[in-house]
Image (cartoon, rainbow, N blue to C red):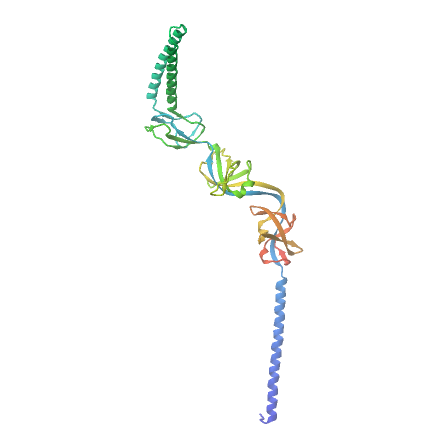
C-alpha cells in the first residue's frame, strides 16, 4: 500500500462512495415497503363487510303488558255455625267437591228436638186459649184486654217455636253453593258455638287473577281486553281470560291500581293461591311495517337502522311504536321488503361496502 498523500486521498473517496450507495439502497427499500403498506391499507378499507339481513314485512302487532299475578276465588265462603252444639259427625273432608245444600256436618240435636217439642206443646195450649178468648169476646162475655193478651201470648210463643225449629235446622251444616272444601277447622266432639268457623268453601270456576299495574298504564286498560295466563305447575299450557273489573282509584302508597281478570278453569287445574305470569293484550295494531328488534340501533332516544342499497349500508332514521316478542313496529323510515342489517351493524358505518351472508 502507498502511504503518500495521493494514495490516502484515493482511499477516502472510495469510502464515501460506499456510504452513498448504501444510503441509496436503504432509501429504495423503504419506499417500496411504504408502497406495499399503503396497498395493504387500501385493500383493508375497501374490503366488503359480511352482514346478515332481514326483510321488513307487514303484519299485526300487539301492545301488551306482562306482570305476575295471584289467583283468588271470587266465590269464597267461610262457613260458620249459626247455633250451639256438640259436633256429632263430619260428612266431608278437605278437597271434596260438594253440591249446593249438601250436608257437610251434623251437630247434636237431641236437646234441640226436646226444645222444639216443648215449644210446640205450649203453642198448642196457647192456640186453644186464644180461640176461647176470641169466642167469648165475640159474644161480649170477655173484655178486649183478655183477648189481646191471649193473642199476644200466642204470637210470642209461635215466634219462640219457629226459632227452635230454625236452630234445629241450623244444626245440620250445609254448603251454600257448589264448590270445593279447601279447609276444615273442626273435629268430631268439639263444642261448636255461634259464629265458629267450620269450613272454607270456594267455587273453582270463579277463579280470577288479581293484578296491580302502575298508574301510567291506566289509560290503556279496559274491561273485556284479553289476558293470557301461565303457571309453573303447567308450563306448557296457556289459560285464556279477560279483564272483568278495573278499580277506578290509584293506591297512593304504591302508585298502582287493581285489575281483576276472570280466568277460564273448566278443567279445574288452577288452584286458589297459585302464582302466575299474565300478559294483558292492551291493543292490536293491524297490518303495520314490522322488523326484528335486532336491527334497531338507539342513541340519545333516536332510532336508526342500516338498509342495504346497491351493496352498501345506508344509515336510515326510523320512528317506532310498539315492541313485542323481539319485533318492533316502524311507523316511519322503512318500506315493506327493505333489507335491514341485523348482524354486523356495530362494525359498519353509513356507506360501508357490505356482503350479505345467507343464513
- Tell me if residue 145 can be seen: yes
From the top left corner, tell me how far across and down residue 42 is, in percent.
63, 65
| Residue sitting at the far bottom | 4
Q: Say above or below: 217 vs 129.
A: below
Give the quarter of the figure containing the N terminus.
bottom right
- Tell me if residue 127 can be seen: no
Q: Quadrant of residue 274?
A: top left
Judge from the rendering whether residue 359 lies leftward or rightward of residue 164; answer left or right: right
Q: Residue at x 32, y 21 (%)?
A: 111
Q: Say above or below: 183 vs 328.
A: above
User: Along the line of sight, which residue is nearer the eye, 181 or 298?
Assistant: 298
User: Along the line of sight, which residue is nearer the eye, 82 or 287?
Assistant: 82
Judge from the rendering whether residue 210 lies leftward or rightward of residue 173; answer left or right: right
User: Along the line of sight, which residue is nearer the eye, 26 or 324?
Assistant: 324
Q: Residue at x 60, y 85 (%)?
A: 16
Q: Say above or below: 137 vs 46.
A: above
From the top left corner, tell me how far across and down residue 126 is, in percent.
36, 13
| Residue sitting at the far right | 310
Amino acid at each position: 500500500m502507498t502511504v503518500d498523500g495521493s494514495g490516502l486521498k484515493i482511499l477516502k473517496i472510495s469510502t464515501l462512495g460506499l456510504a452513498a450507495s448504501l444510503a441509496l439502497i436503504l432509501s429504495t427499500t423503504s419506499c417500496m415497503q411504504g408502497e406495499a403498506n399503503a396497498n395493504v391499507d387500501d385493500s383493508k378499507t375497501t374490503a366488503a363487510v359480511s352482514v346478515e339481513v332481514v326483510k321488513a314485512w307487514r303484519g299485526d302487532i300487539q301492545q301488551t303488558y306482562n306482570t305476575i299475578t295471584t289467583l283468588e276465588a271470587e266465590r269464597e265462603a267461610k262457613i260458620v255455625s249459626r247455633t250451639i252444639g256438640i259436633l256429632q259427625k263430619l260428612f266431608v273432608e278437605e278437597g271434596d267437591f260438594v253440591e249446593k245444600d249438601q250436608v257437610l256436618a251434623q251437630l247434636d240435636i237431641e236437646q234441640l228436638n226436646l226444645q222444639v217439642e216443648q215449644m210446640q206443646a205450649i203453642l198448642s195450649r196457647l192456640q186453644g186459649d186464644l180461640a176461647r178468648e176470641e169466642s167469648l169476646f165475640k159474644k161480649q162475655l170477655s173484655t178486649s184486654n183478655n183477648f189481646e193478651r191471649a193473642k199476644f201470648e200466642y204470637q210470642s210463643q209461635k215466634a219462640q217455636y219457629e226459632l227452635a225449629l230454625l236452630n234445629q235446622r241450623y244444626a245440620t251444616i250445609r254448603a251454600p253453593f257448589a264448590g270445593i272444601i279447601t279447609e276444615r277447622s273442626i273435629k268430631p266432639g268439639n263444642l261448636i258455638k255461634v259464629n265458629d268457623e267450620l269450613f272454607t268453601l270456594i267455587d273453582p270456576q270463579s277463579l280470577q287473577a288479581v293484578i296491580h299495574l302502575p298508574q301510567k298504564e291506566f289509560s290503556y286498560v279496559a274491561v273485556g281486553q284479553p289476558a293470557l295466563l301461565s303457571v309453573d305447575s303447567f308450563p306448557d299450557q296457556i289459560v285464556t281470560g279477560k279483564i272483568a273489573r278495573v278499580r277506578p282509584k290509584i293506591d297512593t302508597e304504591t302508585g298502582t291500581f287493581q285489575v281483576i281478570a276472570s280466568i277460564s278453569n273448566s278443567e279445574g287445574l288452577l288452584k286458589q293461591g297459585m302464582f302466575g305470569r299474565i300478559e294483558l293484550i292492551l291493543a292490536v295494531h293491524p297490518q303495520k311495517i314490522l322488523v326484528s328488534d335486532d336491527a334497531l340501533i338507539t342513541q340519545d332516544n333516536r332510532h336508526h337502522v342500516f338498509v342495504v342499497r346497491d351493496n352498501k349500508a345506508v344509515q336510515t332514521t326510523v320512528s317506532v311504536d310498539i315492541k313485542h316478542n323481539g319485533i318492533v313496529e316502524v311507523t316511519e323510515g322503512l318500506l315493506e321488503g327493505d333489507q335491514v342489517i341485523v348482524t354486523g351493524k356495530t362494525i359498519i358505518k353509513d356507506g360501508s361496502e357490505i356482503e350479505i351472508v345467507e343464513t
